[in-house]
Each structure stands twice: as C-alpha cells, then as structure tokens.
Amino acid sequence: MPDTQIQDAAAPVAITAILAELRGIVGDRGLLTEASDTAAYAEDWRKLYQGRTQAVIRPASTAELAAVVAACAKARVALVPQGGNTSMVGGATPSADGSELVLSLSRMNRIRAIDPVDLTLTLEAGVTLKAAQNAAAEAGCLLPLSISSEGTAQIGGVLATNAGGNNTVRYGNARDLVLGLEVVLPDGQIWNGLRRLRKDNTGYCLRQLFVGSEGTLGVITAAVLKLAPRPVEIEVALCAVPTAEAALALYTRCNQHDPAAIQAFEYMSGQGMEFVLRNIDGTSLPLTKSPHYALVELATPCAGAGLREAMEQVLAAAMEDGVVTDAVIAESETQRLALWKLREEHAEAQKREGASVKNDVAVPVSKVPELLARAAIAAQKLMPGIRMVPFGHMGDGNIHLNFEQPMDMPGAEFLAQDHAIMDMVGEIVRDLDGSFSAEHGVGLLKPYMMPEWRGGAELDTMRKIKAALDPHNLMNPGKVLPGMRASS
Ligand code: 2HG
Ligand code: ZN
C-alpha cells in the first residue's frame, strides 16, 4: 500500500490548542511542558537522536490515557509512547520538529494481581521489569525475562518491543510470556484483553499484533504475564574458551547433558571483557585472561537435582578436551551476581569507551562462529583499526556484533560510517540466513532496512495493518515502517 494512504500528523499549532484539554484530563502532575522537564524524554539512551517535544503527558490510569489518545486523534496530534526510554534503536524518541507529544507510562505502575497457582502476573505498563521480577519472587515465582536494562525498562516497552534477553534460550522472548493485554487503540478505544487463559482459540491473536509493534499500532497499558516456578538450585560458571567454535562446542555439550537445565548461555569476547574491566567499577576477572568467554547458568525448581555435579562434570570433560581452558563456578549469590555483572555491563562499558555502532543480529546458532570470523575480516578491510566487540545470547544465535571506533578516529567521523558498517555486517548475516534485528527492534534506526529484508508481501501486509488501525499515522510515526516520515 502506498504511504499516501496514511495521512500526515498535525502541525505544531494544533498542539498548543490541545494542551489545555490534555491538562484537564491528566491534571498538572500529568503534564510536563517546561523544556528542562521534557528534555530527558526527547533524547534516546544512546544519544543517537535528539528530538523535541512541546509536552510529556503522564496519565495515571487507562481511562486517562484513553481520553488523551482520543483527544489527540481528534486534533490529529501524534504521540510517542515511552516507558523507561532504554531503546537501542531510538524507538521512543520524538521527532526533531516538535510536532509529536511524548506519552509516558511511568505513573501507571501498579501490580494488579499475582496468582502462584495460575502462575500469572497482572500488571500495568509502567512497572519496571525489575519491580515485576521482585513481585514474582515475593510470591515464590519467577518472571523469566531478564535484560541488562531491567532496572529502568518498563513492562509496556519490554512488550511493545518484544524484548529478548538472557533467559530466552529457555523461556522464549517477551512474546512467549504474554497471556493477555490491555491496549488503547489509536482512536482512543480501550481493548481489554487481560485474559489469563492458557488456551483461547478465538479468532485472530490480537495480543501478538501489539507485542513487537513498537508503539505504532496502539499503547499497551497493562498485561498478564506467564510466570514460572522459582528455581531453587542455580549454578553459574564463567568459562575461558580458546575460540568461538569452542564456545559453541561447550553450548552443545551443556545441551546434550541436560537441555532442560540451561537457563542462559552467553558469549563474550576478550575485547568486550577488557572494556568492562576498564570502565566499570567493582569488576575483576576471576580467571585467566582469554580471547573468548562463555557464561553458563543452569537452574531448576527441583531441590536436590544435582546441578552442581552436572556443571562440574560438563566443565571437567570440556577442560580435558581443550574446549575450556579455565573456569570458575560461583560459590555464593554474591559471586553469581559478580559473574553476571561482567556480562550485564557490556552495553554501559561500551558506551563509556566511546562511539559505537551496534548490530543486534541473529543467525542459526551453529553459524555464530562463522559470523564472527567473517565479520572480523570484513570489518578490518572496511576500516583498519576498528574494534569489534561481539557479545550476547549465543544460545539463541543472537550476537550483539558491535564495533567501537579505531583508537585514533574521532567519534563523529566513525559514526558517519554507520551505514557502511551495518551493511557490511548485514551482507554476512543475510548470507547466513539471519536477521538484522534479533531483539532490539527497528525503531528509528533501521526502517530503511525493511524493504530489503522484509519487502514484498510481508511489508505490504504490515502497511495494511498500520493503515487500518492508525490511518492518520499518529502512533509513534517514523518508527518501524520505512518512508512514513523523515525523522531525527
Ligand atoms: C544486552 O544484551 C543488551 O546486553 C544490549 O541487549 C546490547 O549494547 C548492546 O548492543
Ligand atoms: Zn541483548
């Protein structure tokens, strides 16, 4: 469908006219208009996009939010839904022309219900992932979604972007954990789909349309999430491995030993580890320095399952065969967290190190070593001295194939080459039957890739869905679909 069937949003003048109406709906506490208050909402976490907005609207309930959306729809004012603002692809940043208002979910942060028998958690979109995990833990359960930004990221954003993270290898992506949703549609209607059923085969699965839509089809205001029984035995090991092939071989060995026990299998490079040790306070390497590392977590809700022995057995055999050169198993919860910190702080460490170009790619698990080897060669050919910092969720074939500027190159000069670097990686990923965005989404950064990767019937269908639900392009314009608006 041509873009012309989706109309442009309103000019800024309409916004000034609507602000009094919005204040009437959400009250003074619910509306920020001072530039000093709105600035943080207009910039993304990576500082790639500098937007501008005349107001941040902070409704306190679904009814308020629906009234805001209805008023904006009537006035043709575009909205940018925003949770914790931790997007890696500018997915929650308003445009630079000031024509879009930010719709913050932060005040809608109540846990509505938790049921340890049904294993469900019903909560509002503004609850942080960390708070949701804590609520589940207090009820003796596990919310099995874990990402580096979980202290700030909010459930609405996590679902709207179908976040992945560290436990996907066992429990799936955010999408796999959603039983029900409450959504405010672009015209202001509330869809209450907060069902807690494991089986409900009644027509199109609407909730899955909104999960991963990155706020372009409506605003997720609440959800019912699936919980899991809480593990009582957890074993974590950090392993030094000589090659990426060895990291993959270790994953296969863990899988062959007991696939049900693997809770996470993460890969890190020597370069990434060096960045963490240099930039993050309170980190130290508890084993021999290595060009590659794997972090393995095994977990089970069954007491006395013998996970420690299992971990020791697998690692001993792997060491004997040269697959692992050194390893340390956490002896306490403090040590477990310290090992995870070495992995979790990769994004922050990389940010502190300088300018970076990120490639959140996925390939079949078996192809990860080939991906790394080919990218290392192609990158040096493209830009001698470029520093490759691959890390991530090896058990899912999802590698953050990131690059840092050469030591002697100014950051801006490096970032000007971002498309060339992303295209170089894209070519290899495509050849390996992979994806250009495994878990961070498309946002503002990657819509230009959509025609090449998702063109034809797939993109055409996406455009038809968008036009049907949001004919005036008022929901997060410029994100996901290409050619809808030049932004940033
Ligand atoms: C992670 O796995 C996040 O830590 C961030 O997805 C990845 O910084 C990145 O590229
Ligand atoms: Zn990740």
Image (cartoon, grey):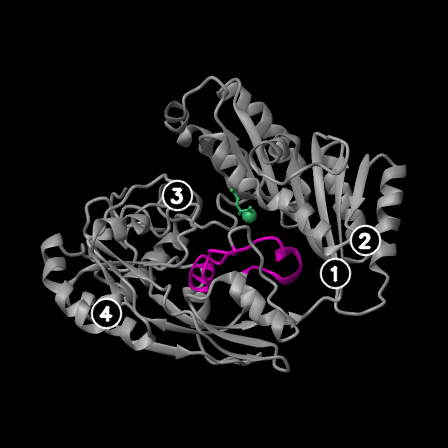
* Label ID, residue 256: 2
3 or 2: tag closer to the N-terminus: 2
Q: Spatial distance from mark 4 to mark 2, Cα to Cα?
A: 53 Å
What element does badge 3 sit on? loop
The residue that label 3 is drawn on is 446
Alpha carbon of mark 1 to alpha carbon of mark 4: how far?
44 Å
Q: Which mark's residue is nearer the viewer, 2 or 1?
A: 1
Q: Ligand 2 within 8 A of label 2's CB?
A: no
At label 3, the amino acid type is Lys
Badge 3: how crowded within 10 Å, few (<14), some, or many (20+)? many
On whether residue 73 falls in the magenta region, the answer is no
Residue 83: which quarter of the image? Answer: bottom left
Pointer 4 residue: 68
Which residue is drawn at the image coordinates 26% and 44% (left, top)?
A: 487
Q: Which residues are magenta?
A: 150-173
**Quarter holding residue 1:** bottom left
Place of residue 222 in the rendered image (x, y in percent of width and height, measured from the top left): 42, 72
